[in-house]
Image: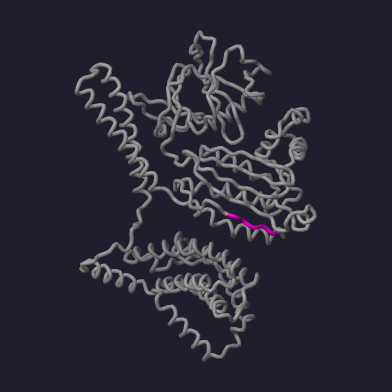
Amino acid sequence: MEGVTQNPMLIDPEMKEIVDSFLLETKEILENLNVDLMELEKRPDDLDLLNQIFRSFHTIKGTSGFLGLEKLPEVTHKCEDILNKLRRGEAKLNSNIMDGILLGYDVIKELMFKIENDKNEDVDVENVINVLTGLLKNLGEANLPEEQIQQSNQIENKEQKEIKTDATTVVSNEKNNATKLASSPDTRKTDNTIRVDVERLDALLNIASELVLGRNRLTQVNSQFALEYENTNIAKDLADATKQIDLMTTELQLVVMKLRMIKIGKVFNRFPRVVRDMCKELEKEVELKIYGEDTEVDKNLIEEINDPLVHLIRNAIDHGIEKPDVRESKGKNRKGTVILSAEHEGNNIVIKIEDDGKGIDPEVIKEKAISKGFITAEKAKELTKQEAYNLIFHPGFSTAEVVTNVSGRGVGMDVVKTNVAKLRGTISIESEVDKGTRIILRLPLTLAIISGMIVKACNQTLVIPLHSVIEVIRVNKNQIETVRGREVINLRDSILPIVGLEELLDNAENGHKKDSDWQYIVEVGIAEKRFGIKVDNLIGQQEVVIKSLGNYLGKIDGIAGSTIMGDGTVVIILDINELFNKLEKKLNA
């Protein structure tokens, strides 16, 4: 960075391993601290928790000091001093003290970002040092005699001797321990985990994906071979070998997928802090309950779902939970409740965000949509309750009366919908006025290998991602009606628009229609939307590997990628989200 000098120790090649280890360990400590600090506010008298938090700050201070850092040890030392007062009973935790510690925590995170990315500490820490010093003065730190401060530090050093503050000592001790263990006749496994670079896992997943394609090809060859050489020994041997390869490939795929799995608590544990900060800003009282934090999802998914969940949690508190006095007047508890939960459901993960707030009034939503010009008053009267809820996902929609730091800018739910759709997931809303709202996200567990429905349409074989398929319907062609120039069917008292793939994919071929009185329709859904795709034949269901179309073809609207079938042919995988967008444009044209 121009004008800012990099820390020599951070860029020294010989120190790289120690620096990388420091960054990794400190980020883990900060993740745990985020959870512990929120727990401390609930249990301020828990001495074990206080000591644990103190040790976390102390460890960061020691290791950062060894690396020649200055600002990071300074901030952590001040936080440590305050925590020392609390754990010795010389002060009682209150909101101001917690605000100060959290401010220190935020600045430490900011410093860590600069250290990792820019190899320097170019962060202004004057304000946080002043705040923490002021807190210490209020706690009587400034009035302690020098002898008592020295004595206090000696006690602290004695208590904390188990914390290794010198990285070279850590390395030396680890080597000595390893030697002792290796020479010991009773060697026991001291640690059953190892750190693996994500790129290596990605490479392993890619190989497993290719193996799935090979398995599919072998299965196809085996089927053809069995027809020609039925009841021969070689046909039986090939069938047995195929079954074994099929079983092993499935097992390998599951193992590789599990290697990439991370507990969703990694994301969920960030939200107690989000809720705390919002409650202070909006003068509301909210209890956040978290369930299913041990539910595991793919690492790539973890990185993508954070932003949608932030929007949904903030919306639940801002739009859902009422002010304490309003809740009391309704006969509710002054403190609102927001529940964040996750669970597995087949090959999907289901995340729910529930609140016991004011709920969503469909009529209010309709009025706002009319005033914004999104729909006409006539159209609003035709909308069902669910369709009214779905207006929330319209870009620019907001029910906030006043624009604040939290909401009212017309961004939020449309961003959530877009992000969820990118992850090939769905989102739905359930609500009851004055009872609360529940938002349900359904997301695939992995983004590399998907289950697909193989269909024939437009004279070609296509794959429809199974997570987007709601059901397959076989209807008589007489049941297909035309409304405003668009084909629809009446499905259980609701109107489902249907469309041919030749129209969606701009394929001029219309010769694929068969001389039959029956039509297969695959009902698909993304987020809150539904429509039916007309297909000629249903071939079956199969796990497929998504491959990009490459730089030559680039991104094509409506196509997520391609895969290789068992007979070696390349078929396209439909992007249902893009097809929805194309259909909407056609309908609104």
Question: As rendered, which of 519 and 582 lies closer to the eye?
Answer: 519
Image quarter where the C terminus lies is top right
Q: Is 501 on the left-hand or right-hand side of 182?
A: right
> Tell me, what colour scheme is on the image?
one colour
- The secondary structure that dominates the magenta segment is strand
Picture residue at 52% right of the left edge, 51% below the top = 292
Residue 280 placement (x, y as % from top left): 68, 62
Q: Is residue 533 above or below residue 162?
A: above
Q: Does residue 286 belong to the magenta stretch?
A: yes
Question: As rendered, which of 515 and 107 lies closer to the eye?
Answer: 515
Q: Does residue 244 belong to the magenta stretch?
A: no
Residue 581 placement (x, y as % from top left): 58, 30
Q: Is residue 146 above or below residue 295?
A: below
Magenta-tinted stretch: 285-289
- The part of the image, by quadrant, that contains residue 18 is bottom left
- The part of the image, by quadrant, that contains residue 331 is bottom right
Q: Is residue 236 above or below residue 354?
A: above
Picture residue at 66% right of the left edge, 54% below the top = 337
